[in-house]
């Protein structure tokens, strides 16, 4: 039986695993959204679609690579409870990717 106030906890690396899977799902969602957006833009502005593909697809690849790197770093050193990993590059790259996709979509709506 557990005492009051104590929660059941899984293995120490489990939160890191869940976080890594969440980041990879986010990267895949951005990649899928980018491909759909490029498909829509390609019909009206092929030059814009090629330029966007050259920027957005490598950015999605970098974000996926950072997610895997963050997962391996988290497995090497499991942080103490309620403390996050210090690496902030992955959220920054995903924010950049979201801004780029949103800007491309806005440009397509305004000038498409």
Image (spheres, helix red, strand yellow):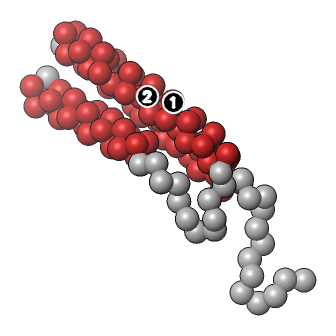
In terms of secondary structure, where does tag 1 sit? Answer: helix
Q: Estimate the spatial distance between the alpha carbons at disc 1 and disc 2, rounded to whole Å.
A: 5 Å
Quadrant location of the N terminus in the rendered image: bottom right
Q: Residue 65 in the image: state x and y as whole percent.
A: 51, 30
Q: Mark 1 points at which residue?
A: 65
Can residue 52 be seen by looking at this rendering? yes
Q: Residue 9 in the image: state x and y as whole percent.
A: 76, 67
Depicted 38 relative to depicted 33: above or below: above
**What residue is shown at x 19% (from left), y 16% (from top)?**
48
Mark 1: few/some/many CA within 10 Å (<14, 14-19, 20+): some
Q: Residue 21 in the image: state x and y as whole percent.
A: 61, 43
Can residue 40 be seen by looking at this rendering? no
Depicted 44 relative to depicted 79: above or below: above
Depth order, front residue of 1/65: 65
Depicted 97 relative to depicted 45: above or below: below
**What residue is shown at x 43% (from left), y 42% (from top)?**
90
Q: Mark 2 points at which residue?
A: 62
Q: Residue 86 in the image: state x and y as whole percent.
A: 47, 54
Q: Are marks 1 and 2 in contact (CB under 8 Å)?
A: yes
Residue most extreme to the front? 77
* Image quadrant where residue 68 sits: top right
């Amino acid at each position: 039986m557990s005492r009051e106030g104590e929660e059941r906890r899984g293995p120490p690396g489990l939160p890191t695993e869940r976080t890594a899977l969440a980041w990879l799902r986010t990267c895949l969602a951005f990649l899928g959204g980018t491909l759909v957006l490029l498909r829509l833009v390609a019909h009206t502005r092929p030059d814009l679609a090629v330029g966007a593909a050259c920027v957005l697809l490598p950015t999605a690849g970098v974000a996926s690579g950072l997610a895997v790197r963050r997962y391996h770093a988290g497995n090497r050193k499991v942080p103490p409870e309620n403390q996050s990993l210090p690496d902030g590059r992955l959220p920054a790259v995903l924010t950049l990717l979201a801004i780029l996709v949103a800007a491309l979509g806005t440009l397509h709506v305004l000038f498409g």
